[in-house]
Amino acid sequence: MKKVCAMTSSIFCFDKPAPSIRQLREAGIGSVMFDYSPFCSALGLLRLRQRMEEAERTGEEKPRWTPKRDAAYYERVTEAFAEQNFYPSIARLPFIDVRLQLEEPEEYAELSELTIKVNKDCIAAAEAFGCTHIIVQPLFAGIERGQEWEVNREFFLTLAAACKRPETKILLINQCVDRNGHLIRGICSDGREAAAWVDALNKEVAERYDAVDGAAGNERFDFCLDIGSCNLCGQNIQSMAAALGSRIQAVILTENDGQRPAKLLPFTNAYNRSSTMNWLGVIRGLREISFDGYLILETIDTTVAFSPLLQPYLYPLYGAMLDYFEMQIQIERDLKKYRQIALFGAGNMCRNYLKCYGDKYPPLFTCDNNPKLWGTELEGLAVKDPQELKNLPENSGVIICNIFYREIEAQLREMGITNIGYFNDEYMPSFYFDRLKREIPDEEEEEAEE
Amino acid sequence: MLRIGVQTKNVITDEDPEAGFRLLKQTGFSAVDFSLNDYLKNSSLYRSELNTFFDRSVQELEAFFAPHKKGAEAAGIVIGQMHMPYPSYVPGADQEINDYLWNVVAPKSMSVCAYLGCPYIVIHGFKLAYFLGSEEKEWQETEKFIESLAPYAKEMGITICIENLYEGVSGHILEGPCCDAVKAAERIDRMNDKYQAEVLGFCFDTGHANLVGIDMESFLETLGSRLKVLHVHDNDGISDLHQIPFTFTKTRENRPSTDWEGFVRGLRKAGYGGTLSFETAPVLSSFPEAMKADALAFIAKIGAYLAGCI
């Protein structure tokens, strides 16, 4: 899994990029998603063009465009990345706020035209910079209902043609639509439809390649799942992920209150001692599709809300957050790693392990520091003295099933055990439910009844 | 012309049901959504509290509701749809309670529905995804429940309607059972094919759809003729308020934040010809008692307006 922070979510100083990059590295953050929004904007160009036309009409002096962030500026930023060998491999092209309302209907066509130009330039720049995955917002502004696919089909095929490198992937992304201030499900927010778009685009690209030069077409398009947009629309993210499957090559990990499109650190929009996001659905969904792409932490609103004096302390937390989600999504990774496993802990977490994973990854035994439990059984599993772990067969692992991870890990290391894995039951594939367990037959039994 | 309906809750009393039906007729309604759920409230069920209402035999229940039936007929009001008490399964409750809901309350509700001549009964799908791990497994349990009622439905000529619901995560409302129109359509068709009758249909709830950002137009278009009844009401996109349509805005332009235009287009595309039934009982407890008739008349006028648009 590639764990990255959105560049604009960090305290990235574009005027002095080198120290920012150094800080990220020191915090253990492996890379960033390079964001082109700070460098160019189709909407900004539209406004400039309008001001120039206005000046032409009125005879006033034409406004002069003297952008602070010009091409040379962009080069200085990218050079700083190169100097520190900190190359981003994923980029996001400039986005337009889904709440945008333009005054004149014809402005929308002009904006789309500029968006295509800006995106083509940015793709060239991103490829030159070494990015292999490029997130592109679908065209939405001013598009009539029912025309979304046709307009975007042309748009994305145009961008595909602009790609020079065969390995470049264009990632479509789900987004909301604004209905009089209420954000509801918009373009690519239906998982099935989004999957169909990706497949149709890939098919067309493949056909065009074949037709032009007989070369096999590549899978040019994939998908970036924006968890924040899903949450604004109250979506079942687990179902959304299932519908898109392996097309999901990047996930924007962020949180909001379900009403406003803020970009907060996960678990911070809490109420009643719990986050208001359905992280269970997110994790279940990403586990189901064995997600192993880009995990992108986007937290600009949390970051900037903190005092600059405190912001540097957030970086290590961001790194830990990415590690945590990786652990949760790949919870079976440690279980698969060892030929045989023993558990450490004989409480509820162990019981949950046995219920959800016991059949697939049966442990030899579990152990516990409480001597009263030694010689007993938990759900049919022997509970032993931790000293027994020293007698485990070679290539065995010990999976900690207790919230005192650090203490137990230290204890195991002191015993000379290094094959250590972690289990966590915060986000289980199902939850223990005695009565249901009795009532609901296994799938095999159900089939047998038929 | 589409009928205009409203919940019986907060209007029809057991003491003098005919007076309530007369009031509804006078204020512009021609149909009701019979609130059978008012006799066994969900708030009690979530506390694992049952009452004895459904301990009555079917004959006793029919006798109990005879004045209601008579009152509706006398006032010229059609009992167009009914809401079964919900939930029909309480996660974590005693087996005894769930057995009672499943084996007593549900079949007796069907009998009451048939007695009142009501063609549609709305149920709530089970909310079990958290425990079972997925929406598909959750649906399997709901389907078992529907299957237990489907033979009655076929025999009685009733269509059971599943409704788009929501779930709460620390106060934030998210998509719940039956919020996927494509899946719902497939499941309805499969069930009806199996029973060779329209035993299953859909109840579209505008308020619930608004809470979870559903694109109403495309949802309704996908449902098509499987759409049988409606729960029309409005909210702020945050809480399930069951208020009067066109009430809520979110911008300074003060345009409605619920997509009523999409709703109208969706009904048109679905070819809907049933009742525009308002699930707005909380409006009647919010307005002063002296304004009840005015509030009802206003709701009915909105219904007539929407019917005209469709």
Image: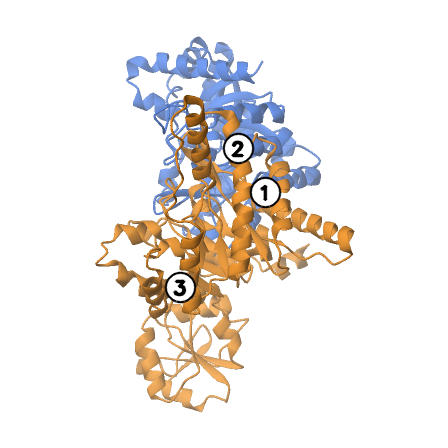
Chain colours: A orange, B blue
- Rounded to the nearest angstrom, the CA distance separating label 1 from label 3 is 68 Å
Mark 2 = which residue?
Answer: A110
Q: Position of residue B181 (x, y in %)?
A: 58, 38
Asked whether the residues under marks 2 and 1 belong to the same chain, the reply is: no
Q: Secondary structure at mark 1?
A: helix
Residue B156 position in % (x across, y down): 62, 29
Q: Position of residue A442 (x, y in %)?
A: 58, 60
Q: Amino acid at mark 2?
A: Glu
**Residue B101 percent location from the top left of the image:** 47, 42
User: Distance from label 2 to label 3 (Cα)?
Assistant: 35 Å
Which residue does the numbered mark 3 point to in the structure image?
Answer: A80
Q: Secondary structure at mark 3?
A: helix
Q: For mark 1, what is the residue?
A: B148
- Verify CB contact (< 8 Å) between mark 1 and mark 3: no
What SS does tag 2 mark? Answer: helix
Tag shown at residue B57: none
Q: Which residue occupies the foreground of this view, B83 or A123? A: A123
Q: Nearer the viewer, residue A81 or B66?
A: A81
Kindly give the residue lying farthest to the top in the view shown. B26
With respect to residue A77, does B153 lie above or below?
above
**Marks 2 and 3 on same chain:** yes
Give the mark nearest the N terminus, 2 or 3: 3
Please say whether residue A387 is visible from this viewpoint: yes
